[in-house]
Image: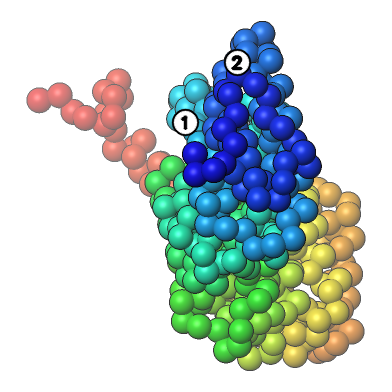
């Protein structure tokens, strides 16, 4: 047709090197069309010949895209986007995660589901990655095919249970964000919406860590001063991501994003610390250890003015963590004093901070069951006594006075209850339950 060579469908297509340059585009279209055939990999014995032919053809497309030395035409762009869409934008995994949640399966400990069609999918991803990354791809033309609808479907794939697929998607989306500047606000908003749904509706998504990894790089490139849109993203999406129970699956990437914001604009430290305190875990010790680790990273980038705004509620929480009966939580809280920057901030405000944490320090020193926690506590006490022994003595006196008052109050309360019990026993007629008289 139109002077092009037409190949019979049952015949293998020739290699690109065996046709003249004028025919290569038409041959690419034929090969891309052949790769639009989707096969059932659930049965490894079906369509073996066709599957192998498609695999080899996909490898040829990878070579063609990689070695291109002229701008891709719109025909090539259309065929690549069509072939990618048919192969990748498939139905989700057969076993919905909602069912697994009802059955009580622990998603964190479950083995990831590996897609049996990966031998083909991987090469399709490789074709698309090399196309997006190629200098021969004109973003102004390609945006007609890699449009908002295409990007949304690509983002849906991040919920794949196959970690190999999510890794490719992470690299590809990052490349698209870098190449297609016109799509950047849309991509950020779409990721935002995924986070909102995850935090406030489902708490089920496999690709949060990968999306946060992309965002870590994006945040790193934000220009100063930060736009209000970016600050709202921190406040409404990133900080609430500490809420879900499965935060451990993506906490490392989340912590990096949060710290990037504070390093970009130190005035955000107060907002971030108060956000952490809002979602602070009460009964989950391993989560609390993670929060304390993140808190140290944020405090490392915090300046004096911001520290002073939040230090009272912050050290009330740190005191509570120091007193934890879980030794790892108590240790992690006491390790904050090993950081020179944090120790310096504390010393500049010790007259506010020491009275808050003193009861926790003293109770640990006198009676914590763990030797390592007691030892760390004594080290922290020494820091304060060396800095201002007189003020430390005042705090000790106040603590002893408060303890004495509490003991007196407890004794009075116990005596009152005992007297009430005695009075109740005296006024109740014998043999009649609950002191009720028969009438």
Is residue 263 positioned above or below 428 on the image? below
**Disc 1: which residue:** 91
Horizontal and vertical percent for residue 59? 74, 37
The image's mark for residue 16 is: none
- In-image side of 372 versus 58 (left or right): right
Q: Nearer the viewer, residue 50 or 361?
A: 50
| Picture coordinates of residue 270, whole percent (x, y) | 57, 79
Q: Is disc 2 placed on a helix, strand or loop?
A: loop
From this viewpoint, is residue 25 visible?
yes
- Asked if residue 397 shows in the view, the reply is no
In this view, the residue in front, 426 or 99, is: 99
Pinpoint residue 118: horizontal percent, then vertical percent. 68, 30
Q: Which image quarter holds the C terminus?
A: top left
Q: Which numbered disc, 2 or 1, marks the residue that appears first in the sequence?
A: 2
User: Where is residue 100 shown, x and y percent of the image?
Assistant: 51, 25
Could you classify mark 1 by the number of other residues whose Cα lies within 10 Å: few (under 14), some (14-19), or many (20 or more)?
few
In contact (CB < 8 Å): disc 2 and disc 1: no
Specify the quadrant of the image occupied by residue 157: top right
* Residue located farthest toward the left when viewing the structure as drawn: 439
Q: Splitting the image into 4 quarters, where does residue 148 fall?
A: bottom left
Task: State left or right for residue 45 relative to residue 270.
Answer: right
Q: Nearer the viewer, residue 26 or 174?
A: 26
Provide the secondary structure element on which disc 1 rests: loop
Say left or right for 348 vs 226: right
Q: Give the residue furthest to the top.
A: 45
* Residue position marked by numbered label 2 in the rendering: 42
Q: Is residue 151 left or right of residue 287?
A: left
Choose between 108 and 180: the one closer to the eye: 180
* Residue name at image x 55 percent, y 84 percent: 226
């Amino acid at each position: 047709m139109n002077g092009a060579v037409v190949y019979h469908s049952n015949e293998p297509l020739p290699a690109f090197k065996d046709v003249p340059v004028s025919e290569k585009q038409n041959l690419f279209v034929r090969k891309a069309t052949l790769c639009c055939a989707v096969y059932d990999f659930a049965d490894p014995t079906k369509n073996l010949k066709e599957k192998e032919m498609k695999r080899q053809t996909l490898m040829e497309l990878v070579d063609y895209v990689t070695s291109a030395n002229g701008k891709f035409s719109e025909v090539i762009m259309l065929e690549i986007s069509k072939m990618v869409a048919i192969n990748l934008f498939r139905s989700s995994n057969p076993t919905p995660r909602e069912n697994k949640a009802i059955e009580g399966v622990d998603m964190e400990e479950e083995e990831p589901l590996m897609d049996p069609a990966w031998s083909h999918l991987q090469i399709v991803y490789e074709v698309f990655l090399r196309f997006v990354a190629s200098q021969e791809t004109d973003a102004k033309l390609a945006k007609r095919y890699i449009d908002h609808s295409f990007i949304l479907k690509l983002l849906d794939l991040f919920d794949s249970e196959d970690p190999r697929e999510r890794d490719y998607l992470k690299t590809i989306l990052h490349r698209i964000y870098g190449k297609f500047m016109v799509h950047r606000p849309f991509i950020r908003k779409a990721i935002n919406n995924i986070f909102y749904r995850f935090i406030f509706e489902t708490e089920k998504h496999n690709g949060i860590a990968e999306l946060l990894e992309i965002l870590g790089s994006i945040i790193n490139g934000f220009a100063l001063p930060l736009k209000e849109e970016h600050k709202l993203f921190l406040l409404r999406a990133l900080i609430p991501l500490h809420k879900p129970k499965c935060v451990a699956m993506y906490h490392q990437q989340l912590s990096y994003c949060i710290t990037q914001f504070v390093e970009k604009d130190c005035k955000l430290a107060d907002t971030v610390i108060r956000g952490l305190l809002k979602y602070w875990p009460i009964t989950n010790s391993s989560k609390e250890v993670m929060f304390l680790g993140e808190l140290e990273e944020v405090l490392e980038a915090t300046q004096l003015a911001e520290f002073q705004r939040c230090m009272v509620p912050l050290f009330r929480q740190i005191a509570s963590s120091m007193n934890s009966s879980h030794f790892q939580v108590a240790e992690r809280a006491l390790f904050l004093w090993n950081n020179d920057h944090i120790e310096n901030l504390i010393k500049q405000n010790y007259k506010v901070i020491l009275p808050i944490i003193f009861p926790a320090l003293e109770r640990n020193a006198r009676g914590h069951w763990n030797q390592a926690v007691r030892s760390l506590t004594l080290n922290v006490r020494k820091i304060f006594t060396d800095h201002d022994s007189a003020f430390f003595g005042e705090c000790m006196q106040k603590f002893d006075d408060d303890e004495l008052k509490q003991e007196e109050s407890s004794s009075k309360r116990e005596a009152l209850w005992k007297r009430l019990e005695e009075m109740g026993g005296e006024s109740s007629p014998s043999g009649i339950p609950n002191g009720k008289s028969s009438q």
